[in-house]
Amino acid sequence: MRGVEPKAFDHSWHEGSPLDLWDVTVDLTAEADGNFGQEGKYLYRFHLQRGDQTVTFWFSDLFARATGRGILSAFTIDAAASFCVDGWGFSRPRQVSSDATQS
């Protein structure tokens, strides 16, 4: 996006992890150089390198839950939103017997 400079965050590889895990923790504290760290929509993509050689210039997150412009992945920071990790509101469907009749 024009006028918005990207920030690079290197991922760390967890050697020997069952699913070959790579991860990164990003501090979203507000900075003076723009809107980073403030509420709003954040666009991101991945750039794959092996050493100093580019393997893939960029690709989107296959597991992203939202998208931005084009095929960029996205997430939204909203201070008013609350997150609950107790099953994400999932409830098991009620089982209906096969001899149920409609009234």
Image (spheres, rainbow, N blue to C red):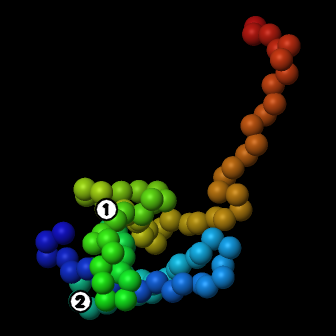
Under tag 1, what secondary structure?
loop
Q: Nearer the viewer, residue 88 or 73?
A: 73
Q: Which residue is mark 1?
A: 72
Distance of label 2 from label 1 (alpha carbons): 22 Å
Q: Nearer the viewer, residue 47 or 72?
A: 47
Q: Residue furthest left?
A: 2
* Picture residue at 35% right of the left edge, 81% below the top: 49
Disc 2 and disc 1 in contact, CB within 8 angstroms: no
For label 2, the crowd category at 10 Å Cα-Cα, with few meaning under 14, some 14 to 19 and many 20 or more, is few
Between circles 2 and 1, the one closer to the viewer is 1
* Picture residue at 31% right of the left edge, 89% below the top: 52
Q: Is residue 20 left or right of residue 76?
A: right
Residue 27 placed where, x, y %? 45, 87
Quadrant of the image containing the C terminus: top right
Under tag 2, what secondary structure?
loop
* Picture residue at 41% right of the left edge, 56% below the top: 66
Q: Amino acid at mark 2?
A: Asp
Residue 42 at least partly seen:
no
* Picture residue at 60% right of the left edge, 84% below the top: 14
